[in-house]
Image (cartoon, rainbow, N blue to C red):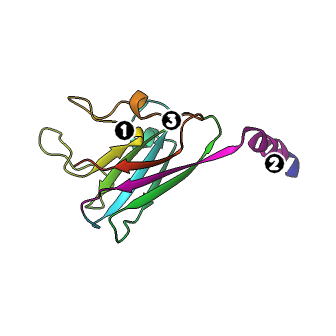
């Protein structure tokens, strides 16, 4: 058993781990929670969390902010989608034509497309980018 762990440990040490931190600001209230979803590619970004590599659910602080931290393998390309889940149902609430009714953000503060969410390519970060970002919530 310990022989199996040694190659894994050596791989981790050789690739390293980066800390990615996303401070979410501009939340309109303290209701609910903030959900940060980490994607490694465009598949499912940003609306299909079941295709994501990880997810964090964090509380909202007294100053209407939240912080999501992820450990990622060094050199990994990532993008993060953020939801201010005010009703705590784990999903983006939208109106009858699909316009978000809860706050959202994406890494790099990527903007929504004319008729849709931000693109992965606009939100992605790589090892050469700053993995500590302040994200502004859109309502």
Secondary structure of residue under mark 1: loop
Mark 3 surroundings within 10 Å by alpha-carbon count, few (fewer than 14), some (14 through 19), many (20 or more):
many
Q: Which mark is residue 5?
A: 2
- Between circles 3 and 2, the one closer to the viewer is 3
Secondary structure of residue under mark 3: loop
Q: Is residue 104 magenta?
A: no
Of label 3 and label 1, which has the lower sequence position? Answer: 1
Secondary structure of residue under mark 2: helix
Cα separation between marks 3 and 2: 30 Å
Q: Residue at x 25, y 32 (%)?
A: 116
**From the viewer's perspective, is residue 1 above or below residue 53?**
below
Residue at the spot of label 1: 46
Q: Is residue 18 magenta?
A: yes
Mark 2 surroundings within 10 Å by alpha-carbon count, few (fewer than 14), some (14 through 19), many (20 or more):
few
Q: Residue at x 30, y 47 (%)?
A: 104
Q: Residue 13, position in %: x, y?
A: 78, 44
Q: Residue at x 52, y 54 (%)?
A: 69
Q: Magenta residues?
A: 4-28
Quarter residue 96 falls in: top left
């Amino acid at each position: 058993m310990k022989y199996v762990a040694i190659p894994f440990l050596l791989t981790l040490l050789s690739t390293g781990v980066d800390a990615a931190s996303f401070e979410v600001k501009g939340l309109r209230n303290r209701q609910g929670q903030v959900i940060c979803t980490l994607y490694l590619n465009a598949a499912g970004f940003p609306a299909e969390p079941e295709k994501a590599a990880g997810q964090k659910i964090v509380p909202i602080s007294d100053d209407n902010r939240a912080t999501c931290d992820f450990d990622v393998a060094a050199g990994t390309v990532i993008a993060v989608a953020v939801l201010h889940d005010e009703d705590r149902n784990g999903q983006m609430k939208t109106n009858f034509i699909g316009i978000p009714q809860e706050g959202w953000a994406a890494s790099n503060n990527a903007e929504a497309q004319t008729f849709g969410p931000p693109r992965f390519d606009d939100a992605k970060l790589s090892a050469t980018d700053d993995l500590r970002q302040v994200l502004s919530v859109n309502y």
